[in-house]
Amino acid sequence: MSTTAELLKGAAELFPDEVVTTAHVRHLELPGAGRFALITLDNGLDHTKPTTFGPQSLANLDAAIDQVEREAADGEIVGAGLTGKPFIFAVGADLKGVELLGRHEDALAIGKGGHDVFKRLAGLAVPTFAYYNGASMGGGVEVGLHCTYRTVSRAVPAFSLPEVFLGLVPGWGGCALLPNLIGADRAVTVIIENSLNQNRQLKGGQVFELGIADALFDGADFLEQSLLWTASVLRGETVVERAEVDRGEGWDAAVARGRAIADAKVHGAAPAAYRALEIIAAAKDGDLQAGFDAEDRALADLIMGGELRSGLYAFNLVQKRAKRPAGAPDRSLARPVTKVGVVGAGLMASQLALLFLRRLEVPVVLTDIDQERIDKGVGYVRAEIDKLLGKGRINQDQANRLKALVTGVLDKAEGFADADFVIEAVFEEMGVKQQVFAEVEAVAPAHAILATNTSSLSVSEMASKLKHPERVVGFHFFNPVAILPLLEIVRGERTDEASLATAFAVAKQLKKTAVLVKDAPAFVVNRILTRFMGEIQNVIDEGTPVATAERAVEPLGLPMSPLVLLELVGPAIGLHVSETLNRAFPDRFTVSPNLAAVVKAGKRGFYVYDSGRPELDPEVAALLVQGDAVLTEEQVRARVLEAVAQEIGLMLDEGVVAEAQDIDLCLITGAGWPFHLGGITPYLDREGVSERVNGKPFLAPGVASVPA
């Protein structure tokens, strides 16, 4: 038995539940070229269960390469290729098994095992080809990088090296091979920039344009066309030419760009991006084996660290828990929605109308207080559809149909008489919303769901004056509506099961991550963010410099600083939510007089950007009235985290959500909370804040924590 086989056999004992991928070898006669070996990766499951590489799967590929290697050495084949089952090439390492590793040497063995198998493809006596026929991620991309040539299907929907997003590095050749193939700058885009932008995926055409693949073919006959192209290459008729890689200043500039991206996204708080950049920087001299060794070390170190555990915890929340919302009623209770009404025609209402239109493809009608506003709202939706057409996201027939489905009317009776679902997005004031719902209830069918997009007001109070409060449900979206996945579905005191089930069914059609939330002030995300922001504002009011307060939370690696986030949300909205929570919980939520002054002055935020970077607006600085209590960054950070831990503990005691996992899911999908934190509760547990404030951790031992 070879050293690699022994290594993988030992590792396989640590992965008892691995979904094993087979590597089947078959032979083809390529026209004018000769006998060719094609290895197909397949885990025997349907396309919803992607092919992965655990130790036994790597051992199976290793055995297949044994066979191909013998055939190549004996002159029995002219080349070898690698492809996947329908719709899937391979999506990398079996992450379920990675979570089980408890020793550094075991983690090192996984990295070395993958390298030892994959690099054999580059060492065969014949050319090798990877045919990216479907979704390809992580190790799936990397195994192809070890081949001599690559083709990609135009239909590939997702292609990425997502490791940095999860808290790892591309550790089976990605960091060393990719920059040597396409140049450091393009490699930084794939490995660092795309990963840190919420795991942005490449399409098949982009893979070809970047130079990762040497040929691009349509999906219908992709493998056939790839094999014909392979024959042409082997006959010498097609010569693959690749651009020369810049190994001078361009390489160094690319690494510097990657560091700037990492600094902007994680502020040095997460090591994975920086470890990947170190390997890319060292790969400049083309010493691939040194790069592979560095990848092994980085993988082992990161597998044993807390960032990966948190990243996998967050990944599982988004991939699994999000698909089975805790507390959601039986789907069979949901009623069909064949027409949607939107009360309001402002920007938020128009974004909602566009989303319902695109996802449900049913008539959507907007109303407002005058025709000018209605026309503007309908015009916005139709203009956005034209933009989608211009980008090739939809065709002309789809554009025409969608534009015909959106209309606007002044008369609610005319617009909503046959609507199944009506959502309001009007001014955030209880009396206004109660009046709107009274008007809608008078004209909408008895079965129609009445949904509110309120960000902080009581759904139960909103429904309290209606004849049928049981059909009112909170449907709180996050801005920008088209991008942020979260939808907080709020159950009022009298909301019935059918209305709630319909709300969840609609959320699924909208492709949103729905979380069931109790009707409590500001629900989940806004309540936590307001407590978080409130403590920042408190320390500023008390005397801590703005810059110190902002820097204090940089170690969390949040996507933006608190006051930049306030600018995005809007100071007036932030003030309104803090006032709402102050009325509900005056002992914990304050209303900052400085924030009130900023809003009164009509300022859009605390900063100006004259130099391209945020600088405190002199006019805002003149408005600030501060005390003389100056805290250090460490003191500010401790105070903020303890406040957040206290609030989350109280929310869980109140039953605002089912479990701490739902808090994290909300923050990740609704506020862009970093994957490397796993949301917020794993971070608070790791830092000991949960225990210090609440006397216990939020999560059970071993969940999103560093192995003992």
Image (cartoon, rainbow, N blue to C red):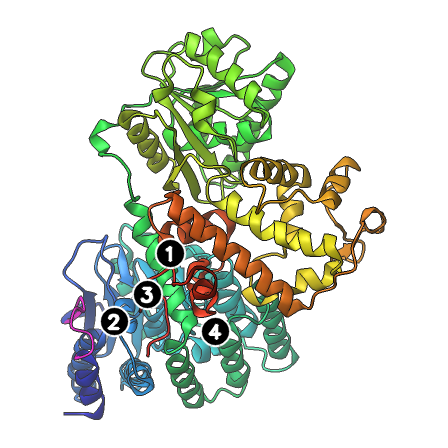
Percent of width and height locating residue 619 = 84, 47
With respect to residue 597, does 344 lie above or below? Answer: above
Query: Residue 337: within the magenta?
Result: no
State if disc 1 and disc 4 touch (CB < 8 Å): no
Magenta: predominant secondary structure element? loop
Magenta residues, start to end: 13-24
Question: Is label 4 in a helix, a strand or a loop?
Answer: helix
**Decide: marks 1, 3 in contact (CB < 8 A)?**
no
* Pointer 3 residue: 703
* Nearest-to-viewer mark from 2 and 1: 2
Q: In which quarter of the image is residue 107?
A: bottom left
Which label's residue is closer to the chain start, 4 or 3? Answer: 4
Residue 199 seen in this snapshot: no
Image spot of residue 641 (x, y percent)? 54, 60
Look at label 1 and name its amino acid.
Ala
**Which callout, 4 or 1, points at the residue further toward the start of the chain?**
1
Q: Is mark 3 on a helix, strand or loop?
A: loop
Counting residues from the start of the chain, the first of labels 2 and 1 encountered is: 2
Circle 2 sits on which residue? Answer: 97
- Residue drawn at the location 73% of the way across and 43% of the way down: 593
Which amino acid, mark 2? Gly
Residue at numbered disc 4 = 272
